[in-house]
Image (tube, rainbow, N blue to C red):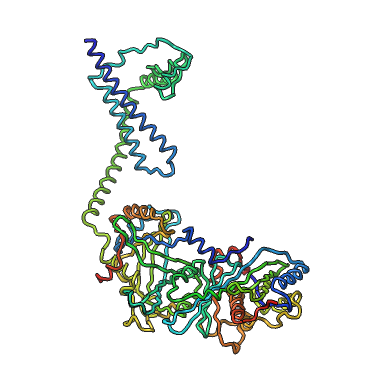
Amino acid sequence: MQQREEKQLESALDSIIQRVNDLKQSIASMIFKIENEYETINWPSFLDNYALISGQLTTLTKVLSHDKCPVLRNLTVLPLMLSPERDEQLAQLTEHRVTTFAHDLCPDYLRTKLEPVAENKMLQLETKALGLQYDNAQKQIATYQKVISHVWDIVSKAREEWESESSSRGNTQQNSSVADTHLLVAAVGMGKGLKMGPNPNGQTNPTSGGMMVTPGRAGGPPGPGQMPPTTQAMSMNKAPAGIKTNIKSAAQMHPYGR
Amino acid sequence: MGVTILTQFALENKTGPQTVEVLSKRICALGAVQQGHFLVDCETYTSVPQLGHQRTVHVLHNSEQPATVFSLLDNGTKITALATDGLFDLLMMKMSQFYTSKKQTKAESKGLRYEIGDFYVKLGTVTVSSNYKGILVEVEYRPCVVPAMCWDLLKEFLQGFLGLTAPTNPPTYLQNRMQEVYTPIDTIHQYLEHFTMFRKSPGIYRN
Amino acid sequence: MSLPGNAMDSLSAALKCNIIPNQEYLLQGSVLDQYVEVLLHRLRGLCDNVDSGPESFHDHEICFSLRIPNTAASTPMPMSIFSLRVRRALDVSDTPYQLRYIGQQELGDKNRPTVVRSSIDMACSSTILEFLTELGCRIEFEYIARGYMFRKGRMKITVSKIFKMGGNKPESVEPISQSYLVELSVLAPSGQDAIGEDMRIFAEQLRPLVQLEKIDYKRLGNIM
């Protein structure tokens, strides 16, 4: 009888330890991510991590409340020996988090009740709750419920709208046309449908409307204040001044004083 | 940016380095301070015969405008100027099937740059495909951008250190645009004129 | 000031170090006119320039080409063609023109998420039109693009309406389709293929509104 109980306890402890270890690992990896990848981490992967931890917590609770699990609170842990010396075995067991099993640390690690400060606070809150008038409490609950149900309504309405919209779009709506894509890409890339001249090999092309006539002083007499042209053979053309100030890096090196 | 005048200079019985040294001494005696170096280069591309009548593209760089490439396209009757970003050189490489570069005509003028009051003076040694060709003196008067308004001043300044050989008339390129606002492309036009002259001249002032 | 280096030398040095962004990674798609607002809304949420809102543009693009007959019999093409594009803003008067060379597109295999093509992009003075004409180029086609530009990191997203030029007046332009062209692109030095994966993920977020895909121009040529 005793042996069976002991066995049960052992297996229960094993599975608890395993769950706790899983939990510990995922918390560690989450902390690592927050500390090292805070620049690149995105919400979906962050929430995935969180969901994992919360799932593991649920499993742990389930294991604890399972009927096969012996009632742990009936068991006692009794520290037999305290020592201020460093205990290598203990350090190894706890991944160097606890190195000595001494009188100042032991109460913290073996605690089954809340810390005195927290316990006091809990007590205060409980007495306050007990002292509350029944009517008042009822009223407060009603107000909260009203507010919450209102918010709930808004959220569910928005969700309904969103779902109906997205489902209708996903099913029937056509937002783009493959034919149009091909038409546009061929036009921009190869000039399909944009060439106006009947003979693409002709020397003159009517496409170039008057609109794109060079603003530069092509051929014609240049701007005002110009001296009459000399007998020079070349009528040289000058790049308009405006452009040069626009070529920025050069302008920065040498701001033209105008 | 002001108005720039470019002129060739030579001294009898003096080599290039000696001439530059003489000029440098004179200009420093006037109170000029040396301010780094400068480089203007010119590469010339010509169209392949299949493209019809021959056209020439001169691609120039000026260290005064280091991020800009200047191109002058000569179709025989007129010159079209273009200013672009530095990647234009890459584009010319891509066009090698249509425009081929004549490596033996690569011209450059480089040397020291001086500052003296409102003037910049550059003493350039010109080489065409690494052969010494002569000396180009560039003087820029910075506070003014209209050539007609500062030509006399520039002339006087040039005479001050070039002596009697200093030009008495504005460069031919500037003669019919004395009233216009001067821009960096005008300097490029002047350099091209001189580079073309140097390329044609067989004479090398090497005594 | 240090000794100024030869421009060509520094260019070839830059080429060697592979720091010149001369590769364009590209995905293309379209959205019907009536859903463009939904798309813009979504892009506003996804992209970087949230505060300033989308940047609008109104550009005129002309495609020029330089061509010579091929003398070598071995080449399959009868002509050597070199295309250049010039783009200028119609809504802002003081900006430089843009000159652009776009090379052959490479689709790669199925595992490559985007089209890759070489691209040389530069600002230039407005004399470029005359310059290209004198160079021997002629106009192939032109169009007006009006729309919005978004940024997400290195990615550029444009949503643009394409208009055909009608005659000589700028007002008489007509849209060529009932859709907006949507392009997702990145300009990067060659070999940075990782960016393609980012683009694929971003394109995924725009579905099913827009299907951004690798589009093969050669196949388009056969279809139409």
Asked if residue B110 can be seen in this view, the reply is yes
Horizontally, residue B71 falls left or right of residue C180, namely: right
Horizontally, residue A1 falls left or right of residue C23, namely: left
Quadrant of the drawing holding the C terminus of chain C: bottom left
Look at the picture and state if C75 lies above or below A250.
below
What residue do we see at 50% from left, 69% from top?
A: B89
Specify the farthest residue to the bottom. Answer: A231
Look at the picture and state if A171 lies above or below A223.
above
Q: Position of residue A31 (x, y in %)?
A: 41, 34
Horizontally, residue C19 falls left or right of residue B64, namely: left
Look at the picture and state if A235 lies above or below C49.
below
Picture quadrant where residue C164 is located: bottom left
Q: Position of residue B159 (x, y in %)?
A: 75, 77
Asked if residue B184 can be seen in this view, the reply is no
Picture quadrant where residue A10 is located: top left
Q: Position of residue A23 (x, y in %)?
A: 34, 29
Look at the picture and state if A80 lies above or below B145.
above
Pick the residue in front: B88 or C68: C68
Q: Position of residue A201 (x, y in %)?
A: 35, 82
What residue do we see at 57% from left, 87% from top?
A: A233
Pick the residue in front: A169 or B123: B123
